[in-house]
Image (tube, rainbow, N blue to C red):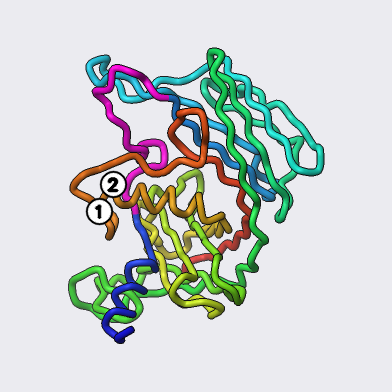
Amino acid sequence: MTKKSIRKTFRFLVMIALFASCEKVIQVDLNSKDPQIVIEAEVTDDISTPQTVKITKSVNISDGETFSIVNGASVILNDNFGNNVTLTETSPGIYQNSGLQGVPGRIYYLTINVAGITYTSVCEMPQSVQLDTIIVNHSSGGGPGGGGPSGPGNGNSNRAESLTPVFQDPIGRGNYYKFKFQKDNETSTSLFLFSDEVVDGGVNNRSLRAGNISLNKEDTIRVIMMCIDKAVYKYFYGISANGNGPNASATPANPVSNITGGALGYFSAYSARTKSIKIE
């Protein structure tokens, strides 16, 4: 492989930034006569985060909205160690439970029943990867432009350009990562994906821009690194192909779901590591 093609492939896989919220990025045929169930389900080993399932339904665009809330669903989560919990609807369309602790290496089974129709999915939680530190990257010059650690910046010393999550990717291909930023009560609407399909077993030095979150001096930013499985990675990568990411497509299509039964969406069992850093 030539250096040019390596750089092209590396750049292609390094970062996928979607400047739309995760609640709006699922592409559906809004003019379809048949509404479709949309499931966004997550199980994590982060003890501060309850296991959460969001269920909506796509509706005809002529009805004046794109998604409607699904109430009264049966949502059951269990693992391969015999643990079983029923998620409670804590707010319209949101089902949660904190009784089942996510454990890396375990297999999780999701069963949802909506109006007599059953949807199922299976996902194994990847082993966690240590998030060592976060590097703050300031602009390197005073000229106009987006800048970054190696390019022209906006000359504003009170803001950072990007953050670099430093972690050691385990040797052996097949590690997939998703990142998000939080500041106060605000969560980044950009979606960042990393993969070791091109560069395996190295220390990450790839930076992330925070999208809608400004990185101002004295701000404290929380970075969440999620280890996800390949099916979930492919799902979100498929979303980027339908949006304004580097793999944007002129003919949008629904990303491949890992949920059976005809629903759109995804089920992700992920291990998470977090770091907070103050912008100096």
Q: Can residue 275 be seen in this view?
A: yes
Left or right: 146 in relation to 212: left
Q: In this view, does 191 lie above or below 279?
A: above
**On the image, numbered disc 2 is attached to which residue?**
242
Q: Is the magenta stretch mostly helix, strand or loop?
A: loop
Separation of marks 2 and 1 at Cα, in angstroms: 6 Å
Q: Is residue 280 visible?
A: no
Q: Residues within 10 Å of mark 2 (few under 14, many from 20)?
A: many
Q: Name the image quarter holding the N terminus.
A: bottom left
Amino acid type of the residue that numbered disc 1 sits on in the rendered structure: Ala
Amino acid type of the residue that numbered disc 2 sits on in the rendered structure: Asn
In the rendered structure, which segment of residues is drawn in magenta?
18-36
- Element type at mark 2: helix
Residue located 44% across and 30% down the image = 38
x and y, in percent, of residue 40 in the image: 50, 36
Query: Number of numbered discs present?
Result: 2
Residue located 28% across and 29% down the image = 29
Residue located 58% across and 58% down the image = 227
First in sequence: mark 2 or mark 1?
2
The residue furthest bottom is 3
Left or right: 134 in relation to 236: right
Residue located 58% across and 19% down the image = 73
Q: Is residue 5 magenta?
A: no
Marks 2 & 1, CB-CB < 8 Å contact: yes
- Element type at mark 1: loop
x and y, in percent, of residue 77 in the image: 68, 33
x and y, in percent, of residue 67 in the image: 37, 24
Numbered tag placed on residue 248 in the rendering: 1
